[in-house]
Image (cartoon, rainbow, N blue to C red):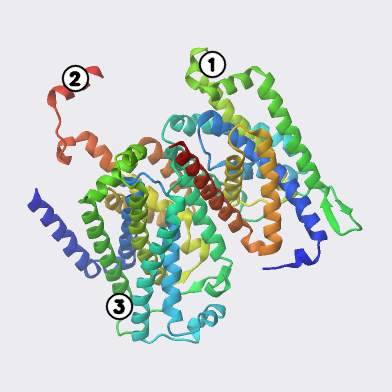
């Protein structure tokens, strides 16, 4: 079992490294896939494991996106002038400036959302159930509306991120962003996996299953909830920062705080794959991306209709997701001990 | 930041008046939300989209030459069946499930409605002009469109009508019984399934009325639904479930808040300030409740 896992991970890693060379036409798609998986994984930390179903993690994603681009521009040029008149035409980043800016931008894009999550966490994570869900929904939309009114980051007309500098071949832009997102994906996966193998995950699950009881057991639930949300925000912000560079253009409600797309996607992907599992979000995101690309390409215009129907169908018929379904069907594979006599009795009862 | 409102105090009268009339309309939508929340324990994210759909019904009546004021009768009649259909198709499968499931399912419905309306009616901002004219007050310094007065009047009539209906009619009693205890109501012979369907239908009908009033007094657009959902949710949590006078008062309060925010912060922050207010209210509520919990210890 252990060996199999290592082979699996090695295979995925090798595929990940070679993917842009095997499938050069799909580099952007693969980068987006990596970002989607990261988002699904981060959502799953507090949505799946902790039971705090957030609609507002898009806040961290959008925040990361704006911060990364702002730092990247602001380090070298006046930000206000850049956004005011399409500054990308007057100011040009040299390759060194671009990569330096990107590095610091991503750093800030990861740290600031984490701090924000920590600051608002104490107030917002005290809400329970649907109040939390609606509050985070409001938070995400409010962020989008407010950032759409702030002049220095482009207000309603959007913000063009620095164009990729000319460093030789045409392929380099795609490869750069692909490897960046792949590295973030690997980091996220390792972080999430190692977090899930500690007591921390058990605490999160205890909070999900019965928060009052967990508190009565002497667990400082608030502390763990905030830390869980901060981990989520860290990688969410990072993913947003990369996505901003990849898309090349930031708009407040259509790209950054896009509750109608990314905000729903991350919830849906985690649920599709099976929330509360390690691999569920990964599988869910992959399936969803395939579905989405198919629909967005062949049924353009109908994609949101399909999305709406998909949400309703998944939520009603597969609330446990793919992994949950498999787990029900083959419990032995998941390391659960099944008592044969008990199972027979169950079948007879039915 | 624009401080014009403090320099010209008459604008405050204008804003308050607009806000109160607008708030009465919000209260009507919130009433529907409180109804289904109380009875079925469902928070319907698609509430605002039902409002917009009702608005489009009125808009099409207006286009075909019928006076849009008649929309307040036709729209709820159609929307009632939309609501019942929605219940039969989707909502009845999520009624007794986890609340998050119902939120997510109605969120899906909301996206679906948004996009279908976008296809069917186009992405333009439209309005149904009622040609009611305007009234000028205080030496012409405060303008008051008669359509707003009309909308407030109709909202009040429908709200009172519904309260009376809930008190007196057989179905109303069944709905209230189900809200108190669905199981006991079932034992006593109430067909709860029917009650749920009717509740959802009534809610949709209320949204239809509100929607046609929105179409007459303001504008409608396929994507404008979510703010109405958030507003009604906010009004219900400020007032508390089952507190009808509270719903009316907090509705007016929210309307005034919005108008003042519009003047002071600027129109681009209007929707943002509503959503931010929601977050602040929830956080305030959380601290108030946690104090109570500590006290109980």
Dot 2 alpha-carbon crowd within 10 angstroms: few under 14, some 14 to 19, many 20 or more: few
Of discs 3 and 2, which sits in the foreground? 2
Which secondary structure lies at badge 1? loop
Quadrant of the snapshot with the N terminus of chain B: bottom right
Chain hosting mark 3: A
Q: In the image shown, does B155 or A294 lie closer to the viewer?
A: B155
A212 relative position to A259: left or right? left
Q: Which mark is residue A172?
A: 3
Query: How far from the left and from the top, in percent, is residue A210?
Result: 34, 37
How far apart are the two marked residues, 1 and 3, measured between alpha carbons?
Answer: 69 Å
Write down the residue under mark 1. Answer: B190
**Residue at 54% from the left image edge and 65% from the top image edge:** A147
The reply to whether residue B149 is visible in this rendering is yes
Write down the residue under mark 2. Answer: A345
Q: Are marks 1 and 3 on the same chain?
A: no
**Residue at 33% from the left image edge and 43% from the top image edge:** A207
Chain hosting mark 2: A
């Amino acid at each position: 079992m252990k060996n199999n896992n290592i082979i699996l991970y090695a295979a995925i890693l090798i595929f990940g490294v070679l993917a842009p060379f095997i499938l050069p036409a799909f580099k952007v798609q693969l980068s987006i896939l990596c970002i989607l998986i990261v988002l699904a994984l981060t959502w799953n930390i507090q949505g799946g494991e902790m039971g705090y179903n957030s609609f507002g993690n898009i806040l961290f994603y959008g925040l990361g996106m704006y911060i990364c681009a702002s730092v990247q521009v602001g380090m070298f040029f006046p930000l206000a002038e850049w956004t005011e008149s399409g500054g990308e035409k007057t100011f040009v980043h040299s390759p060194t400036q671009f990569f330096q800016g990107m590095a610091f931008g991503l750093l800030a894009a990861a740290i600031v959302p984490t701090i924000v999550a920590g600051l608002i966490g104490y107030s917002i994570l005290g809400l329970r159930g649907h109040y939390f869900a609606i509050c985070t929904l409001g938070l995400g939309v409010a962020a989008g509306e407010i950032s759409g009114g702030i002049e220095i980051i482009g207000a309603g007309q959007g913000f063009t991120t620095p164009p990729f500098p000319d460093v030789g071949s045409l392929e380099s832009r795609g490869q750069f962003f692909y490897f960046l997102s792949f590295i973030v994906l690997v980091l996220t996966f390792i972080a999430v996996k190692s977090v899930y193998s500690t007591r921390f995950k058990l605490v999160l699950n205890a909070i999900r299953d019965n928060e009052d009881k967990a508190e009565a057991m002497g667990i400082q639930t608030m502390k763990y909830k905030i830390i869980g949300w901060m981990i989520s925000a860290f990688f969410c912000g990072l993913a947003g920062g990369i996505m901003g560079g990849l898309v090349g253009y930031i708009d407040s409600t259509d790209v950054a705080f896009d509750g109608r797309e990314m905000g729903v996607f991350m919830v849906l992907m985690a649920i599709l794959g099976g929330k509360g599992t390690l691999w569920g979000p990964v599988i869910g995101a992959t399936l969803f991306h395939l579905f989405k690309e198919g629909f967005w390409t062949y049924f353009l215009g109908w994609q949101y209709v399909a999305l709406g129907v998909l949400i309703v169908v998944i939520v009603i018929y597969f609330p446990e997701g793919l992994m949950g379904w498999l787990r029900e069907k083959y419990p032995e594979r998941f390391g659960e001990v099944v008592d044969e006599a008990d199972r027979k009795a169950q079948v007879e009862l039915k | 930041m624009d401080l014009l409102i403090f320099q010209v105090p008459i604008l405050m009268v204008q804003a308050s008046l607009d806000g109160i009339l607008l708030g009465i309309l919000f209260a009507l939508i919130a009433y529907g939300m409180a109804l289904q929340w109380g009875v079925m324990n469902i928070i319907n994210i698609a509430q605002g989209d039902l409002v917009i759909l009702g608005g489009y019904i009125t808009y099409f009546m207006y286009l075909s030459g019928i006076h849009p004021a008649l929309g307040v009768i036709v729209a709820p009649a159609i929307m009632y069946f939309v609501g019942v259909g929605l219940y039969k198709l989707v909502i009845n499968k999520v009624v007794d499930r986890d609340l998050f499931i119902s939120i997510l399912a109605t969120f899906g419905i909301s996206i679906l409605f948004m996009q279908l309306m976008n296809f069917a009616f186009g992405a333009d901002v439209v309005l149904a002009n009622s040609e009611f004219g305007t009234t000028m007050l205080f030496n012409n310094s405060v303008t008051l469109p008669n359509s707003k007065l009309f909308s407030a009047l109709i909202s009040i009539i429908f709200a009172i009508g519904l309260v009376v209906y809930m008190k007196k009619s057989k179905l109303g009693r069944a709905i209230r019984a189900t809200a108190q205890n669905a199981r006991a109501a079932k034992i006593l012979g109430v067909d709860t399934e029917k009650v749920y369907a009717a509740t959802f239908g009534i809610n949709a009908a209320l949204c239809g009325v509100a929607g046609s009033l929105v179409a007459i007094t303001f504008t409608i657009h396929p994507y404008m639904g979510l703010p109405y959902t958030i507003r009604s949710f906010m009004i219900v949590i400020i007032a508390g479930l089952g507190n009808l006078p509270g719903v009316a008062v907090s509705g007016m309060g929210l309307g005034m808040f919005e108008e003042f925010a519009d003047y002071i912060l600027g129109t681009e922050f209007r929707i943002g300030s509503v959503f931010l207010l929601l977050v602040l209210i929830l956080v305030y509520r959380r601290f108030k409740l946690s104090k109570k919990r500590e006290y109980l210890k």
